[in-house]
Image (tube, rainbow, N blue to C red):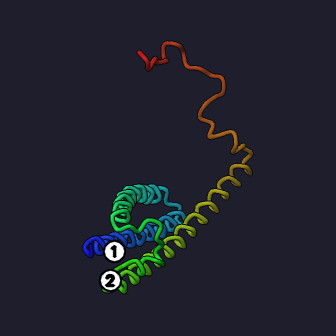
């Protein structure tokens, strides 16, 4: 049973490392926005998407271990109390580190989101000041204009 407990603590440490990587990406995202670096921002967003897949895998492993350990509904704060005596200190430290990593991530992600929102509002203001209606869309399609019949494709065929 102790091996399962240790596996769960290793998983929580992996989760903490992933949150630290996401914090770094959030800082990079904010830097790209400040520097008006759209290509850099796109690259950071791709890396965030890859991290999402990693987090999904960690979550599936976590759910399996939680079920095996009988820890359903146990919060990180309660975790050390549910562990064997010889592992309680390690469980407490791991849980605190994970909560700290999550707190740092939330702070970085909120700052990046605020920076993005501010810049989007500035872009929208420039569009409005130029006389365009941002609600009308990008203007790539003329309303009511259809391509010639021979240019249409029937995808059911």
Task: Judge the density around disc 1: few (<14), some (14-19), many (≥20) Cα neighbours within 10 Å.
Answer: many
Residue 54, picture quadrant:
bottom left
Residue, x 48% and y 17% (percent of image)?
151
Asked whether 114 or 143 is in front, the reply is: 114
Asked whether 58 or 141 is in front, the reply is: 58
Residue 11, picture quadrant:
bottom left
Residue sitting at the far top = 150
Do we see residue 97 in this rendering? Answer: no
Left or right of 7? Residue 56 is right
Asked whether 85 or 109 is in front, the reply is: 85
Residue 139: image x %, image y %?
63, 36
Left or right of 145? Residue 73 is left
The reply to whether callout 2 and callout 1 are in contact (CB within 8 Å) is yes
Task: Judge the density around disc 2: few (<14), some (14-19), many (≥20) Cα neighbours within 10 Å.
Answer: some
Residue, x 72% and y 43% (percent of image)?
133
Work out whether mark 2 precedes mark 1 in sequence or the reverse, and give the earlier one: 1
Determine which residue is flagged by label 2. Answer: 87
Residue, x 33% and y 81% (percent of image)?
84
Q: Quadrant of the C terminus?
A: top left
Q: Under tag 2, what secondary structure? A: helix
Residue 83: image x %, image y %?
36, 79
- Frontmost of labels 2 and 1 is 2
Determine which residue is flagged by label 1. Answer: 9
Residue 74: image x %, image y %?
46, 71
Do we see residue 122 in this rendering? Answer: yes
């Amino acid at each position: 049973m102790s091996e399962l407990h240790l596996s769960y603590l290793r998983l929580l440490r992996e989760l903490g490392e992933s949150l630290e990587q996401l914090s770094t990406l959030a800082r990079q995202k904010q830097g790209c926005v400040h520097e008006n670096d759209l290509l850099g921002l796109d690259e950071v967003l791709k890396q965030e998407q890859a991290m999402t897949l990693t987090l999904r895998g960690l979550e599936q492993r976590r759910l399996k271990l939680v079920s095996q350990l009988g820890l359903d509904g146990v919060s990180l704060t309660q975790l050390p109390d549910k562990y064997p005596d010889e592992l309680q200190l390690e469980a407490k430290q791991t849980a605190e580190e994970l909560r700290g990593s999550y707190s740092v991530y939330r702070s970085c992600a909120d700052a990046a989101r605020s920076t993005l929102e501010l810049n989007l509002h500035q872009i929208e203001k420039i569009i409005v000041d130029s006389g365009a209606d941002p609600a009308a869309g990008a203007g790539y399609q003329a309303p009511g204009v259809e391509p010639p019949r021979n240019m249409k494709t029937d995808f059911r065929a």
